[in-house]
Image (cartoon, rainbow, N blue to C red):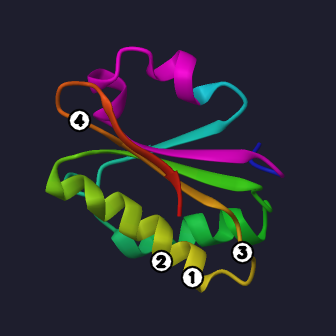
Amino acid sequence: YFKNCDLLVAADCTAYAYGNFHESFIKGKKLVIACPKLDEGIDIYIEKIRQLIEISKVNTITVIIMEVPCCNGLFQIVKKAVVKSNRKVPLKLIIISIEGNILKDEWI
């Protein structure tokens, strides 16, 4: 399912905050959703994303988070997975404001 895909890693609240989430971000990507504040097993997430990079050979990773402090943890998880991987993949960060606007959209 994830082989050679463009991966979208989204904080679960982003789809509620950004009204056009599906139309703007999902097309052409495979989606995984997580919440670093509510979920447990952060090391498991790092390993799973690392495996997606190495085994499934994802092409790119886009991380969508909210501007709230707890959401940055999701980006840190993905960043750690990218660093631990033996493959380098382009990484994009999108930050959504609590009002539902895009505050940042850049390749890291």
Which amino acid is tagged 1? Answer: Val
Q: Which secondary structure lies at badge 1?
A: helix
State yes or no: discs 4 and 1 in contact (Cβ < 8 Å): no
Which amino acid is tagged 2? Answer: Lys
Comes first in the chain, label 2 or label 4? 2
Q: Which secondary structure lies at badge 2?
A: helix
In the rendered structure, does residue 19 fall within the stretch colored magenta? Answer: yes
Horizontal and vertical percent position of residue 77: 41, 68
- Residue for badge 3: 88
Q: What separation in Å lies between label 4 and label 1 (alpha carbons)? A: 27 Å
Q: What separation in Å lies between label 1 and label 2 (alpha carbons)? A: 5 Å
- Residue for badge 4: 97
Q: What separation in Å lies between label 3 and label 2 (alpha carbons)? A: 12 Å
Q: Give the range drawn in magenta.
A: 4-25
- Residue for badge 2: 80
Comes first in the chain, label 4 or label 1? 1
